Image: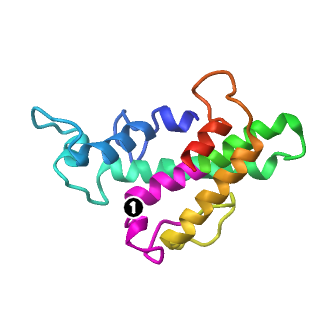
């Protein structure tokens, strides 16, 4: 969860590198859901002006942090015991987070699902020690997202403490 909200250094760029910040910039700003009143050197400016290149801070940071979060979720999934009642909620949350990250990445870095399941998607990561990096199809990515959310909804119960953590209802809602 810390990787979603805490600042992380990426390629020496200054502070402000958070997954949530960059996801919001890339998902909402190009959709004309905001109004920028002046020019800025912040990467949010490029998003509002539809300037998306692979060397922009928000594009690279979001990709890097998304896959770091997926790596951490995979590590939890591999280390925790599904038969242990104490592990079930956390394990379900890990499946939920992995699904959410893949969904965010495929939404931003691939053609929409409605354009065809066979289009190139993003690399799927379902193990912490992946040796191959290839872009899976959009259909394969969505199939994995559905499988992860179904597994998460089985493992999770009610919310863990507050609205800041995924729950069974959240998994079913995203599904």
Residue labelled with disc 1: 109
Q: Position of residue 36 (x, y in %)?
A: 15, 35
Tag 1: Cα neighbours inside 10 Å, few (<14), some, or many (≥20)? few
The answer to whether 153 is drawn above or below residue 111 in the figure is: above
- Where, by quadrant of the figure, is residue 44 drawn? top left
**Towards the viewer: 157 or 20:** 157
**Region of the chain picked out in magenta, as a range:** 99-123
Q: Nearer the viewer, residue 18 or 140?
A: 140
Give the residue at the far top of this rendering: 161
Residue 135 in the figure: left or right of residue 39: right
Q: Is residue 175 magenta?
A: no
Q: Relative to 169, is 24 on the left or the right?
A: left
**Residue 120 colored in magenta in the image:** yes
Could you say where residue 80 lies in the image, as x and y percent from the top left? Answer: 81, 45
Residue pictured at 63% horizontal, 46% vertical: 96
Q: Is residue 39 above or below residue 26?
A: above
Q: Is residue 18 visible?
A: no
């Amino acid at each position: 969860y810390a990787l979603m909200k805490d600042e992380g250094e990426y390629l020496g760029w200054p502070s402000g590198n958070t997954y949530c910040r960059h996801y919001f910039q890339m998902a909402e700003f190009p959709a004309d859901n905001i109004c920028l009143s002046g020019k800025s050197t912040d990467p949010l400016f490029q998003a509002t002006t539809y300037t998306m290149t692979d060397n922009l801070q928000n594009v690279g940071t979001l990709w890097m942090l998304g896959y770091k979060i997926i790596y951490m979720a995979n590590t939890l999934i591999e280390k925790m015991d599904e038969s242990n009642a104490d592990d079930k909620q956390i394990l379900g949350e890990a499946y939920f987070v992995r699904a959410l990250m893949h969904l965010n990445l495929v939404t931003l870095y691939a053609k929409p699902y409605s354009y065809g399941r066979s289009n190139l998607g993003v690399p799927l990561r379902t193990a912490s020690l992946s040796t191959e990096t290839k872009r899976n199809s959009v259909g394969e990515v969505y199939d994995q997202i559905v499988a992860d959310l179904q597994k998460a909804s089985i493992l999770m119960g009610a919310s863990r403490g507050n609205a800041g953590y995924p729950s069974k209802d959240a998994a079913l809602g995203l599904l």
